[in-house]
Amino acid sequence: MTASTGGPHLLDDLAWRGLIAQSTDLDALRRDLDAGMVTLYSGIDPTAPSAHIGHLLQWLTLARFQRAGHRPIALVGGATGLIGDPKPTSERVLNDREVVSEWVDKLGAQLRPFLDFDAGENAALLVNNLDWTEGLSALDFLRDVGKHFRVGRMLAKEAVSRRMESDEGISYAEFSYQLLQSYDFLELHRRYGCTLQTGGSDQWGNLTAGTDLVHRVEGRSLHALGTPLITKADGTKFGKTESGTVWLDPSMTSPYAFYQFWIQAEDAMVGTYLRAFTWLEREEIEELERLTEEKPQAREAQRALARAVTAQVHGQQEVERAEAASRALFGRGELRELDAATLAAAVAEIPSYTAERSEHPTIVDMLVGTGLATGRGAARRTIAEGGAYVNNAKIETEDWAPADGDLLHGRWLVLRRGKRNAAGVELAGA
């Protein structure tokens, strides 16, 4: 997306997509980008066995720079992950070295599909800051790095100041995190000529601490670019659901649940998400935004968003499975065609309960047990009015009970009251 391709300048495209919250000097960065290939980096700490969609935003930002001809470095913090960036509320629990090392490998494998590691001159690099930190003595680190930092500025960082004001305080280990992250920028500049660090705006203090360190040590003025923190329409944190964080690992957030997260995006925010998380062109996104204003009930933008992001993370086949499951749950597809994993994931996203086979639950029992009916009288009325379905087949008698052949993959039933209210039942026991 450089001027030479006939499209918008990279920085103009990033700005249109809402991906520039802060910059050390945007005009100087533009000049450097126009002058030739820039090497940039963004880091992630292995504080969990999977990245989440906040990390995805950073990886996609690196990918946008790479597609514009620049060289991205993806850093996984095997060293910084042993310490942890200070949390505003409490001390981080330190994970064992073996656990952190395992998570480094997992995160590295997760991010690889988003960057091109075989692109020639601007091929992406994957690095681990433990490689240049582990052998560094405490004395050398304090002399060569620590002497360039002023405690007053470090105390001004919001997470640090909030912890200092708390009863718990902050450990020297977490307080020193900023030095470690800054040292990464210095090392990457020395090793690879890296001149730009990107990250979330909540990391701005750490990003600029890195540029300050390089300036003090090397006399060079480097760049930092902060992306905004994506939020929901009410300003609350984006990327959380009732069941927790939206992870990229399919064993932690199923592809079906991942798809559902995006398709449930608020009308007021779907355009923001399309710009930040997809590769759709400006004209297509603006058309989807127009459709959202004129026909919000059609949810065309949400479907485009869910398809695009799920395909990036889990592949097109999982998109098709998720859409087939969504259709089947609400009577517009065949439930028996869903594989067991997709069905289990879909059932996990709707109200459900478990019944013992030995109890021989009837349709009335199950409607009440799942909460689709408020009581047995309401369940009977639903049946009498023709609104009760099991596996998309209408149930017309109150004493109907499932046989083994009714169970999906030998375990599940999908109940529905009317067109829009679905629930799952798992029959347990022999």
Image: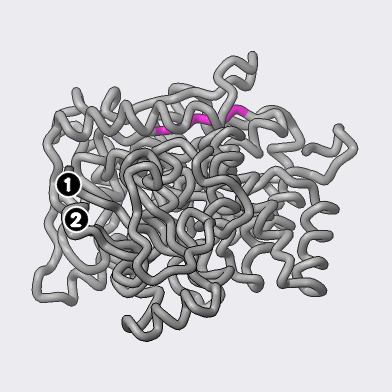
- Residue at 38% over, 71% down: 398
Quadrant of the rendered image containing residue 301 = bottom right
Magenta region: which residues?
71-75
- Residue at 34% over, 27% down: 128
Residue 337: where, in percent of width, then height? Answer: 53, 38
The residue indicated by pointer 1 is: 429
Quadrant of the rendered image containing residue 423 = bottom left
**Residue 339 visible:** yes
Residue 339: where, in percent of width, then height? Answer: 46, 36
Residue 333: where, in percent of width, then height? Answer: 61, 49
Q: Quadrant of the N terminus?
A: top right
Closer to us: 105 or 262:
262
Residue at disc 2, secondary structure:
strand
Seen from this angle, which residue lies furthest right?
6
Few, some or many residues within 10 Å of mark 1 (<14, 14–19, 20+): few
Q: Looking at the picture, which amino acid does disc 1 mark?
A: Gly
* Tag 1 and tag 2, C-beta contact below 8 Å: yes
Q: Looking at the picture, which amino acid does disc 2 mark?
A: Glu
The residue indicated by pointer 2 is: 356
Check if residue 74 falls in the magenta segment. yes
Closer to us: 38 or 1:
1
User: Which comes before the other along the chain, label 1 or label 2?
Assistant: 2
